[in-house]
Image: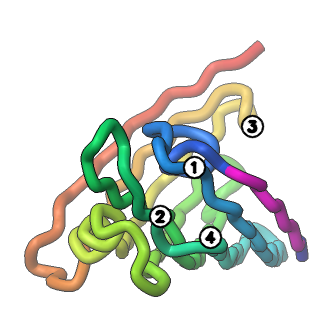
Amino acid sequence: MGLAAAYNHHALRQRSTQGATFALGGFDYAHPTADVTFKWRGLYLFAEGLYRRADLERREGMVMGAATREFSRSHWGYVAQAGLMLTARLELTARWEQAFALGDTDPALQTTLRAQGSQVGAGVNWYQAGHRFKAQADYHYIFGDDPSRGRHQARLQLQVSF
């Protein structure tokens, strides 16, 4: 089990520490998170909850004579993942995640989460030499409020480290 928290005082960027710089001043963000992992005989279960809340939903003011409105980005979400080692080298995985906007947060964030705030996926991993030499393949379906309007994502990765 794990718990973590961060406080970003006067974040001057749209995504707290990255993205476009605000012209009207920053926002204060609280970032608590919690996770739990369970492992037993080749089975693992993992769950994590995330929360990010700004002190204000928006700032309004004038920038170079033009009325300007800038929004903070507050949201929460969770992920649950499971995996099962079928043999000493072959693993199957499954994953589900969702994210939700909080309050009257950034309209662009709300649009993104309505279009792709949920994800379901499955994967297969082959461990030739543990994590030093492995092949991974996974598929995810990413969707929002309307599951019929989602998109497909597939990934294939070979990792070699020494």
Q: Residues within 10 Å of mark 4 (few under 14, many from 20)?
A: many
First of labels 1, 4 by sequence position: 1
Residue highlighted by disc 1: 25
Residue highlighted by disc 4: 54
Residue highlighted by disc 2: 59
Q: What residue type is disc 1 on?
A: Gly
User: What range of the chain is rendered magenta?
Assistant: 3-10
How far apart in space, not on screen, are marks 1 and 3 (Cα)? 48 Å
Q: What residue type is disc 4 on?
A: Ala
* Relative side of 25 to 113, left or right: right
Kindly indicate whether the residue at mark 2 contacts the one at mark 3 (C-beta within 8 angstroms): no
Observer able to see residue 91: yes
- What kind of secondary structure does the magenta stretch mostly adopt? strand
How far apart in space, not on screen, are marks 1 and 4 (Cα)? 13 Å
Determine the residue positioned at 35% across, 60% down. Answer: 69
First of labels 1, 3 by sequence position: 1
Determine the residue positioned at 47% across, 64% down. Answer: 59
Name of the residue lying farthest toward the left: 148
First of labels 4, 3 by sequence position: 4
How far apart in space, not on screen, are marks 3 and 2 (Cα)? 50 Å
Q: Nearer the viewer, mark 4 or mark 3?
A: 4
Give the position of the C terminus as an image quadrant: top right
Q: Residues within 10 Å of mark 3 (few under 14, many from 20)?
A: few
Q: What residue type is disc 2 on?
A: Arg
Q: Position of residue 14 (x, y in %)?
A: 49, 49
Residue highlighted by disc 3: 130
Q: Position of residue 49 (x, y in %)?
A: 67, 78
How far apart in space, not on screen, are marks 4 and 3 (Cα)? 41 Å
Give the position of the N terminus as an image quadrant: bottom right
State which quadrant residue 18 falls in.
top right
Q: What residue type is disc 3 on?
A: Gly
